[in-house]
Amino acid sequence: MKKLASILSMTAMFIAMMASVAFAADDTTAAIDTGDTAWVLISAALVFIMTPGLAFFYGGMVRSKNVLSTIMHSFFIVAMISVEWVLIGYAMTFGSDIGGFIGSLDKVGLTGVGMQVMANGTIPELAFVAFQCMFAIITPALITGAFAERMKFGAFVVFILLWAILIYNPMAHWVWGGGFLAKLGALDFAGGLVIHILSGVSGLTVCILLGKRHGYGKVPMLPHHLPMTVLGAALLWFGWFGFNAGSALGANALAANAFVTTQAAAAMATVSWVACEWMHHGKPTILGAASGCVAGLVAITPAAGFVAPLPAVIIGLIGGIVCYFAVAVVKEKFGYDDSLDAFGVHGIGGTWGAVATGLWCSTEINPAGADGLFYGSADTLIAQLISIVVAYVLAIVGSYILFKVVSCFMQVRASENEEVSGIDICEHGERAYNQSIMSANTLLSSNAEAFASENFTKPVDLK
């Protein structure tokens, strides 16, 4: 009986210990909201699909001899920047702040980052790592539209990797990681400053340093596959809901607001771009509609979680107009060869969106934000303007230095013969289409170009 009592008492103690462990485990996970976590992970997947979507969007706009190299840019960035983000990018961006300028390296290789809940949050930090990784991926991919059809692949790899480490990571820390722009009061809900201005202005800098494509301005350089571009635009529009609404970091009312403002701005910008094109060139085009929707998505990105739906419509309306003007008028006037209008859409659209955030942001929409100029405070608009200047300076100076450094060690620009033959075959040894299809496409393209030159004063832009 004594042995039985001893066994029973030991069993009871063991059960009690296990119960306390179980309750402790419950306590450590109690703060994690499964609905919020699911939404952030789904949003991360939505943002992921944007980069392949961008590959199609850009790929359809180049000539057939360069479509694979253009798609390769975005596809390869998905892999390269994912590794960079895990090894060092997340630590530089969201590590402990050092003087307001960069994150410490205490999280290199995601050291100490596990399944624990984020501070003041409801999701595990690894979910946040995954979500922000997709932002780090698409940002340098946007730059590639500016120098499409003329950059050597090796130089592209080195430049983009250095750009991600030395330009994107610091800027993301300044705005989102507790850096000096965040302390100044800058608002950027999903990346107008960090993603679109930074990538668009960097793209403009690189395309000017590279010089124009061979024959630019003398021979037509029309999109070779518009259905591919429209597919890419549709994937971007779809993924952008994760981009903006996912930045609420929870399945909540703020995410719903960001979802609606995103749709409203994109739709309005599509209409305003097409209207401008119709009045300017006499014909509305599907390329214009696709470009307009992206312009609206860019413009609303920094404001999506800070403004109401009606201001979002106004932001989209003006965004479509200013981006069309930048693409169809400004680029022609200054003569730079921004191949796929990375600056005209992302640089200008992101700039307008950052300014608009300072005009219409409201604490009624997001108590964690601030009131803008139209709600009684000029401080936020001033912070936005200062942040825009900082983003422009970093993008221009940083990209210029990196480009010059890379050019000291390797050939950056493809040769004239390589451009004429096509980057696909010269850099990658492959073609997108077989020879019979290419011959038919060349004939159709020649006829279309001849028809355009005879019947229109200028082919529709976004070459």
Image (cartoon, helix red, strand yellow):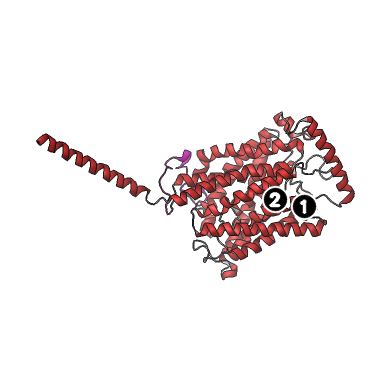
Whether residue 110 appears in magenta in the rendering, the answer is: yes
- For residue 389, which quarter of the picture? bottom right
Does 332 sit left or right of 405 as displayed? right
Quadrant in the picture for the N terminus: top left
Residue 285 is marked as 1
Please give the count of numbered marks on the rendered protein: 2
Query: What is the CA distance from the residue labelled 2 to the residue labelled 1?
Result: 21 Å
Residue 398 percent location from the top left of the image: 63, 46
Whether residue 269 appears in magenta in the rendering, the answer is: no
Helix, strand or loop status at disc 2: helix
| Residue situated in front as seen by the camera: 414 or 130 | 130
Q: Earlier in the sequence, mark 2 or mark 1?
A: 1
Residue 56 percent location from the top left of the image: 68, 42
Magenta span covers which residues?
95-121
Q: Amino acid at mark 2?
A: Phe
Residue pointed to by mark 2: 343
Q: Amino acid at mark 1?
A: Thr
Are the residues tagged 2 and 1 within 8 Å (C-beta)? no
